[in-house]
Image (spheres, rainbow, N blue to C red):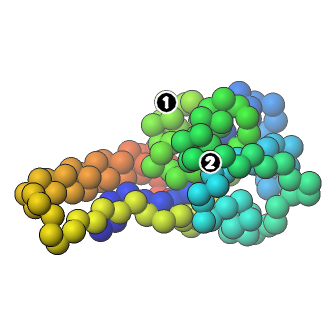
Amino acid sequence: TPFLSGALVAVASPDLIGTGPVRTLDDIAPFRLIEAATNVVGWPDWFARAGGSLPTPTRFLRLEEMFYAVQAALDGLGVALVPSALVVDDLAAGRLQRILDVPGVFERDYCHLVSPVTRNPELARAFCAWLDHEGQEARRLSLSVMGDAMT
């Protein structure tokens, strides 16, 4: 059962973006593009959805885990393509900012699955209910920070 959106956003440190405004796809060319090696959807998909193609040349930083990609963006190493649910708190706090509004780019949603032979079904149901609640809260925060752009 899905409980958390896999909508992807391009984000960067405000300090990095302060070096030059990003108003068009061409404005992204000077920046290193950060993504996780585990992503199925990547920068070529994001650029295609935005109506363009990857800048030439493109500098990539591919990291093993999504959380490393988020940290790299926070550290000002480039523009990261990451799930909005993982960065909404950083966006709300101003530690990261979205780069261009490109809706409709999705990775897999986060889901929970419970085996029908679980040893403690009540505990499993309670945990899934908690995940559902947290997912709803994350969606509310995403809507307040990013609006309907992530649908």
Which residue is denoted by mark 1 in the rendering? 93
- Farthest bottom residue? 116
Disc 1: CA contacts within 10 A as few (<14), some (14-19) or many (>=20) = few
- Residue type for callout 2: Glu
Q: In the rendered image of this protein, does residue 68 appear above or below residue 24?
A: above
Residue in front for this viewpoint, 136 or 112: 112
Residue in front for this viewpoint, 124 or 132: 124
- Residue type for callout 1: Ala
Secondary structure of residue under mark 2: loop
Residue 140 visible in this rendered orientation of the protein: no
What is the distance, in whole Å, between disc 2 and disc 1 at their CAs? Answer: 26 Å
Residue 38 at x, y percent in the picture: 59, 57
- Farthest right residue? 57
Residue 54 visible in this rendered orientation of the protein: yes
Residue 139 at x, y percent in the picture: 37, 53
The residue at 56%/47% (across/down) is 66
Look at the image and tell me in which quarter the N terminus lies. bottom left
